[in-house]
Amino acid sequence: VAGDPVGSWGNRIPLLRCKNPLGCKGATARGNFFLEITGLRPGLYYYKYIVDGTWAVDPTAPKVLDASGNWNNVLEVHEHPPILTTRERL
């Protein structure tokens, strides 16, 4: 994976192979690889995969066309709603 979620387009972070053939991290869809990223702030993050040296997008994930005419996958991170205590909910 390369792009905003891993720091820059120059960074390449390999995906990890799932141990469960039915999916990773509780996913219900069949999958073979994953990448866990934590600490992203709310916003849009653009990324691509590099498969056997070729840049590729996931056709099943959201994607956008950039100003140069390249397709990129896009990940939108939302702000977490505040967690209220019982007293604050009153």
Image (cartoon, helix red, strand yellow):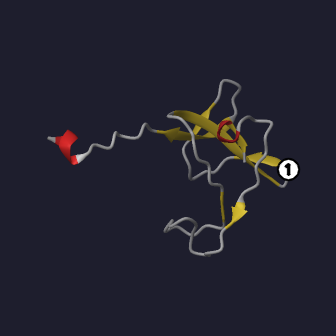
Decide: few, some or many residues near mark 1? Use Cα within 10 Å; few <14, some 14-19, many ≥20.
few
Q: Position of residue 29 (x, y in %)?
A: 52, 67
Considering every residue shown, the one lying at the far left of the view is 90
Q: Residue at coordinates 27% horizontally, 43% vertically from top-left? A: 84
Q: Position of residue 43 (x, y in %)?
A: 52, 32
Give x and y (percent) for residue 51. Answer: 79, 54
Q: Nearer the viewer, residue 34 or 88?
A: 88
Q: How many marks?
A: 1
Left or right of 63? Residue 14 is right
Residue 8 rendering spot, x and y as whole percentages: 73, 34
Quadrant of the rendered structure where residue 2 is?
Answer: top right
- Residue at 70% x, 33% y: name it: 70
Residue at 66% in and 67% down: 32
What residue is shown at x 65% (from left), y 55% (from top)? 35
Q: Secondary structure at mark 1?
A: loop
Viewer-side residue, 45 vs 48:
45
Against 12, residue 34 (above or below) is below
Q: Reply above or below: 49 against 40.
A: below
Q: Is residue 84 left or right of residue 11?
A: left
Q: Can you name the residue that lies furthest to the front here?
A: 87
User: On the rendered structure, is 40 left or right of 90?
Assistant: right
Three-letter code, disc 1? Gly
Quadrant location of residue 33? bottom right
Which corner quadrant holds the C terminus?
top left
Q: Which residue is mark 1?
A: 53
Residue at the top extreme? 67
* Residue lying at the far right of the rendered structure: 53
